[in-house]
Image (spheres, rainbow, N blue to C red):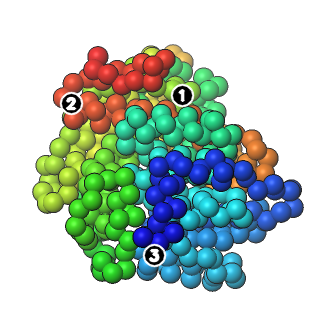
Amino acid sequence: MNDSNISRRAFVAGASVTALGRPRALGANDRLSVAVIGCGDRGLIGELLPHLAGTNTGITVVCDTWRQQREKAAASIQQAAGREPKMLVHYQDVLAMKDVDAVVISAPDHLHCTMLRDAVRAGKDVYVEKPLAMNMKELVEAVDAVKQSGRVVQVGTQVRSFASSVAGRAFVQSGGLGKIFKIEQSRNSYRPYWHRYGQRPIQEADVDWKAFLLNRRYRPWNADQYTAWYGYREFSLGPQTGFMSHFVDLVHFVTGAQFPRRVTALGGIYRWKDARTAPDSFEALLEYDGFLVRYNTSFGTDSNSFLKFFGTRGVMDATEWDKPWVLTGQEDEPDSIARGARIPEMESTPHMRNWLECLRSRKAPAAPIDAGYQHAVACLMADESWTRGTRMAYDAAKRRIYPG
């Protein structure tokens, strides 16, 4: 066993982390050094690149357990920024670098909380992809680590930073929709999103399989589990945390709600029966104080997708959530939204740029760790309702999900 392996084992166990937890002193004119951990299609490099020059930031390290992904990411950064980043396999080696100020975590879902916890303990600011967690134990541990560290953490629910979302929120908060009593999203597609990932050719020799598994039990190399990990519940629970996390976070952002009181859910594999274990159909009903929220995904049809907010004054249609949302008045309602009314446009800061700016200002970003915790709780309630076959409730004081 070599020294680097010993170091990585110690890191995962939590040893030597406090010694790494002293962040580099950063002046206003210093160049920010960012590392990207996880360089696949959700590597977020494309979202980082447009904001590097304007924020005096450089992507200095890329880290991935798949050689071709590392090399592809490094080449794209070299082409766009004129500087090739260092390439690493293990995230622990990234966190041990004193000249890395912040990390973007876009690794598979089962690694989010472990990497987030280790990163903030190592003194790094973090942008972490959604969904934030796969169970309450790891969620609470990671959130507590963030709050103890004082690091700036942005959760990757970027829909709340769209100009349309910012405008829709302001419209609702001003009373423009009246009292909201129901919010619904149906998000469908013909094939599950993990199918296209599973089509990628891969060789075991190009992958560090043990590093990918990390906190999961060891099993022999499985190419499909590596490439189509979204479809395996050991690595990603399914659309109820993948797709639904964006929707629930948007519900919270627009309404100001934090947690559902109760959640009931059903789901299963009805259309695409293969080795993958994530449900291809899922339906959840979430009860908040004063309104209901319904979420649905069906893989097998590309029809009937929508997102709507229902209020006493009418309906706000956010189906095309990156475009201006559409208003419709309520017939026979004396206080109805006027015919032809539009939501006033508002400017917004792109999610990634907001995070980069907050690294210098040390202000709270658009989607702080509390927002990530809230969307994670709602999604985990839905998942547990489905797997347990009963309605789930949430105790905010005890941070506990329970049948109720």
* Disc 1 crowd, CA 10 A, few/some/many (<14, 14-19, 20+): some
Q: Quadrant of residue 230?
A: bottom left
* Disc 2 crowd, CA 10 A, few/some/many (<14, 14-19, 20+): few
Labels 2 and 1 touching (C-beta < 8 A): no
Query: Reading the chain from its start, which is encountered first: label 1 or label 3?
Result: 3
Instruction: Tell me which residue sits at (51%, 68%) in the image.
Output: 4
Q: Is residue 169 left or right of residue 403?
A: right
Is label 3 in a helix, a strand or a loop?
A: helix
Query: Reading the chain from its start, which is encountered first: label 2 or label 1?
Result: 1
Q: Nearer the viewer, residue 219 or 36?
A: 219
Instruction: Tell me which residue sits at (46%, 66%) in the image.
Output: 5
The Cα–Cα distance between marks 1 and 3, rounded to whole angstroms, is 39 Å
Mark sitting on residue 255: 1
Q: Measured from the top left, where is residue 203 in percent x and y?
A: 30, 80
Quadrant in which the N terminus is drawn: bottom left
Position of 8 relative to 77 (above/below): above
Query: Which residue matches tag 2?
Result: 388
Q: Is residue 117 left or right of residue 219?
A: right
Q: Nearer the viewer, residue 162 or 236?
A: 236
The Cα–Cα distance between marks 3 and 2, rounded to whole angstroms, is 38 Å
Q: Quadrant of residue 390?
A: top left
The Cα–Cα distance between marks 2 and 1, rounded to whole angstroms, is 29 Å
Instruction: Tell me which residue sits at (60%, 23%) in the image.
Output: 175
Position of 164 relative to 62 (above/below): above
Q: Measured from the top left, where is residue 119 in percent x and y?
A: 58, 52
Query: Which residue matches tag 3?
Result: 69
Instruction: Tell me which residue sits at (40%, 35%) in the image.
Output: 137
Disc 2 vs disc 1: which is toward the camera?
2
Is label 1 in a helix, a strand or a loop?
A: helix
